[in-house]
Image: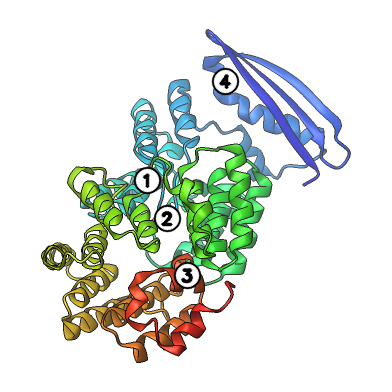
């Protein structure tokens, strides 16, 4: 990257002033600069004018297609464009967000398309926000999915060839290969879009191409150093690859920009626990917005079972926010009660967990692999070995590592937990040995350090084979 654009925008009443300058990144030399004074109603077309002037300043030759794209206006409605820009400033995606962010973005995109029903870009990004909202909903609300498809249909009807529409189509694809093809198509029109590059990295992770995903996320950060979402995703990918020092360095850079970023704080806590540094993780886990399940897990690792029971009991009785409750909180509560010695309460909670998981499976026609795994753990807690193993095997069959290298290994990890609860070291330990060398989103929760800390492994802890694994250095 040889040139960097810097600028500022000032608004006063009905007028806006945009000051732009072009800097040679190699010499820090001022190459070009200009001030643009416009009425707000005329500001929509300013982006194209800026692009032409900057291209002229660096001596770039635009193709006819690029020229057409530069002069094209996304909308003639300044209010719609303002709502769209405010929505675009909200980072969403990759299955997590700060509280309410995705819903706030959806409302702004909806405002934009209400003001201009022909605003293709807004329809495309609205569909992306809505499909992400659907995926974040533990209930998998069918109305959310229908709304996202409707928005995509609007975008397709208006301009199916727009790169952003290809981006939206990729988000809706269930097949990773087809999704990647859509993202590559979007990349042709938007070669330096961090959104597109991150989307490509997301699919590369799903396909098990971890190094390629890292390279693309690093590129996205180079294009936009303040893209907190890309940095968080890079840190998560490093954790999945068991590259915890690099994850921590990435997260420290995020927290230097945004010290209260909930996602970065949580991921940093997970990375610290992964290497066994509970002391450094403790103040991070005490921050607001940390899920109860994480705080309870930390208490379990400290063998403070009463605290874990209290944290989860309070959360399950008072927490209504779907984004802050893990669906298996009730399972962790039962395990905590069991460890605390309240066996009657644990048994009742395990039975309640089984009811909840069965209800979810009926609602989703049994096609929820992690729910099957959690159901297996609940049966294991009750000592019902045959049912526990059957449910764990169903989970792995629904999402095998051979077909889903990203999340398949995490289901094998759940199966190892089931065997451990049943005291079956001969089945659990070979799985653990393999998983400790496997990349997956759950890697931070299955390291030599967490083997030493997590009471789930207590029934097989004295096996010399397990002790050998727990004594390894973190990779």
Q: CA distance from mark 2 to mark 3?
A: 21 Å
Which residue: 41% across, 70% down? Answer: 407
Visible in this render: residue 464?
yes
| Mark before the other along the chain sequence, 4 or 3 | 4
- Residue at mark 3: 440
Q: Which numbered disc, 1 or 2, marks the residue that appears first in the sequence?
A: 1
What percent of the width, then of the height, locates residue 290?
Answer: 39, 47
Q: Which of label 4 and label 1 is nearer to you?
A: 1
**Residue 464, position as x, y percentages in the image:** 45, 89
- For label 4, count other residues whose C-alpha is less than 10 Å away and answer few (under 14), some (14-19) or many (20+): some
The answer for how far apart the CA atoms under marks 1 and 2 are is 9 Å
Q: Which mark identifies residue 127?
A: 1
Front position among marks 2 and 3: 3
Q: Is residue 403 left or right of residue 43?
A: left
Q: Position of residue 188 (x, y in %)?
A: 60, 54
Q: Where is residue 441 shown, x and y percent of the image?
A: 46, 65
CB under 8 Å between discs 1 and 3: no
The kind of secondary structure element at disc 3 is loop
């Amino acid at each position: 990257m040889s040139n960097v654009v810097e600028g500022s925008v000032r608004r006063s009443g009905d007028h806006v002033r945009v000051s732009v300058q072009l800097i040679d990144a190699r010499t820090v030399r001022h190459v070009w600069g200009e001030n643009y004074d416009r009425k707000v109603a005329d500001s929509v077309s300013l982006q194209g004018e800026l692009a032409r002037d900057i291209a002229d300043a660096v001596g770039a030759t635009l193709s006819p297609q690029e020229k057409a794209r530069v002069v094209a206006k996304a909308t003639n409605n300044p209010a719609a464009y303002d709502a769209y820009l405010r929505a675009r400033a909200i980072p969403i995606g990759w299955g997590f967000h700060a509280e309410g962010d995705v819903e706030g973005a959806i409302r702004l995109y909806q405002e934009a398309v209400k003001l201009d029903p022909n605003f293709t870009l807004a329809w495309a990004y609205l569909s992306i926000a809505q499909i992400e909202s659907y995926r974040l909903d533990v209930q998998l609300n069918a109305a959310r999915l229908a709304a996202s498809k409707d928005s995509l249909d609007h975008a397709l009807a208006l301009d199916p060839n727009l790169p952003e529409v290809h981006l939206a189509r990729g988000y809706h694809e269930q097949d990773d290969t087809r999704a990647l093809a859509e993202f590559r198509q979007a990349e042709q029109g938007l070669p330096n879009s961090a959104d597109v590059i991150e989307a490509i990295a997301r699919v590369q992770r799903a396909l098990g191409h971890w190094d390629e995903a890292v390279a693309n996320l690093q590129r996205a950060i180079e294009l936009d150093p303040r893209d907190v979402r890309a940095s968080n995703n890079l840190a998560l990918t490093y954790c999945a690859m068991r590259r915890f020092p690099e994850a921590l360095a990435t997260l420290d850079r995020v927290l230097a920009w945004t010290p209260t970023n909930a996602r970065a704080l949580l991921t940093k806590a997970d990375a610290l626990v992964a290497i066994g540094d509970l002391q450094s993780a403790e103040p991070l886990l005490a921050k607001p917005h940390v899920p109860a399940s994480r705080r309870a897990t930390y208490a379990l690792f400290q063998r403070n079972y009463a605290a874990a029971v209290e944290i989860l009991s309070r959360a399950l009785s008072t927490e209504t926010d779907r984004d802050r409750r893990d669906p298996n909180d009730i399972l962790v509560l039962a395990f905590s009660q069991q460890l605390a010695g309240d066996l009657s309460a644990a048994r009742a909670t395990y039975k309640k967990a089984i009811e909840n998981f069965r209800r979810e499976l009926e609602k989703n026609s049994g096609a929820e692999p992690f729910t099957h795994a959690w159901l297996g753990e609940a049966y294991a807690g009750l000592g019902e070995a045959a049912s526990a193993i059957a449910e764990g095997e169903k989970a792995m069959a629904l999402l095998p590592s051979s077909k889903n290298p990203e999340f398949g290994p995490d289901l094998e990890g759940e199966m190892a937990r089931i065997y451990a609860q049943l005291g079956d070291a001969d089945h659990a330990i070979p799985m653990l040995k393999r998983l400790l060398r496997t990349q997956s989103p759950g890697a931070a929760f299955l390291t030599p350090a967490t083997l030493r800390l997590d009471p789930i492994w207590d029934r097989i802890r004295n096996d010399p084979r397990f002790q050998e694994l727990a004594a390894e250095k973190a990779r």
